[in-house]
Amino acid sequence: MFESICPELIKLGLSPFFMQQLHALEGEGHLGRVACERRGQYEVLTRAGLLRASLSGRLEHRLAEDDRPTVGDWVVVEPAEPVGRVVAVLERQSVLRRSVVDGTSRAQNLAANVDLCCVVAALSGGDEHTRRRALNPRRIERYLMTAQGSNVPALVLVNKADVVSVEEAEEALRALDSLQARLLLVSAHTGQGLDELRAELPVGTSAVLLGSSGVGKSTLVNALLGEQRQRTSAERTDDSRGRHTTTERQLLELESGALLIDTPGMRELSLWADADSEVGGFEDIERLAETCQFRDCSHRTEPGCAVVAAIQAGTLAAERLEHAHKLEKERLFQQARVDVRLRTELAARSKALSRAVRVQLKNKGRR
């Protein structure tokens, strides 16, 4: 049977959601949380210390790829020499995923069982083009949607506040207002905003840092840890951006008692969508859509569209609607790759549209 629940496990984020699952498990083993995964082997934080383990033969054959342990998962390990065995994976409370960029319909797990998703972006010096490229609202929007799709609250950390003036930082924050997200201006070098960030991470809270390469995630982690544990590299001189340093996801314990998952920087974040996914993160458009004349309004050319009216009135940015359409199209494409029924439906819809266009062109030629 499992060892009694102890304060050490509760500090690692063990909650009643996971405790109630233990009653259905049988056998001996150490309950722990996956801190790192390397080439099919896991480092698991347990009451007995850090254990190394690989999947048992039974789980190796039974678990689908996206159900295999990822950083943040709770697992049961049977100790053995030199490497123990993971014999059970507890049901997740949340999981952040992205679509693998390889032309397949596979998902890649980014982190499991997190309470907060910290989306890290960075300010940059230089000309206006360089600043806009560094702080891209559309890229941040993708991270926010990834969090919302997993029902995980998000906080946008605008890092490197020390490389620009106060006025430039305030202007950059105003440019992100359309995201309707919580924003926090921070600097890993000067400590600006770190106390406010620590307040978001009470004991037992699990947070994940997501962001593009070079936004300073590792430097930010070191500032929160109070030591140089994560490897960092010098910034490029042309745009104040760092270089990619973190190569694997890691669960780290902060002095405050919170847990922080550091992740490698991502050059591209392709949205993951299963059969039940919806595009979120556009509450302003959704509120406007409730007053459109037609319930199934696509917000393009229909009469009585409240969304188009808001754009014409200047209260909604046209770029935001364009991005919402783009992400909805991406979601449907991704869903069609995993949902046979939807794939058939979209193919039939495309075929009918093509037929209608041919008929229209044919009739036009007869005139």
Image (spheres, rainbow, N blue to C red):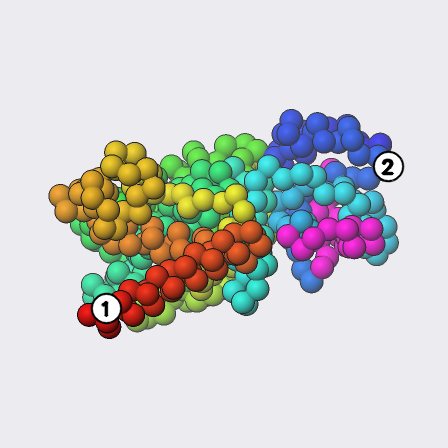
Q: Assign a secondary structure to mark 2.
A: loop
> Residue 2, located in which quarter of the rendered image?
top right
**Circle 2: residue type:** Gly
Q: Assign a secondary structure to mark 1.
A: helix
Question: Residue 182, image x and y in percent?
Answer: 34, 39
The residue tagged 1 is: 364
Q: Which residues are magenta?
A: 40-66
Crowd around label 2: few <14 · some 14–19 · many ≥20 (10 Å) = few
Query: Is 129 left or right of 223, judged from the image as shown?
Result: left
Q: Look at the image and say whether residue 61 sits in the magenta stretch.
A: yes
Query: Is 28 left or right of 297, judged from the image as shown?
Result: right
Task: Give the distance between the C-alpha atoms of the residues marked 1 and 2, in whole angstroms.
Answer: 75 Å
Question: Residue 312, image x and y in percent?
Answer: 14, 47
As drawn, 219 above or below 104: above
Which marked residue is nearer to the observer: mark 1 or mark 2?
1
Inspect this view and state whether residue 212 appears: no
Query: Is 67 left or right of 268, judged from the image as shown?
Result: right
**Circle 1: residue type:** Lys
> Who's the residue at 67% across and 38% down the image?
91
> Who's the residue at 31% across and 47% down the image?
298
The residue tagged 2 is: 27
Q: Look at the image and say whether residue 35 sits in the magenta stretch.
A: no
Inspect this view and state whether residue 363 appears: yes
Of 217 and 147, which appears nearest the observer? 147
Q: Are marks 1 and 2 in contact (CB under 8 Å)?
A: no
> Residue 82, located in which quarter of the rendered image?
bottom right
> Who's the residue at 17% across and 43% down the image?
309
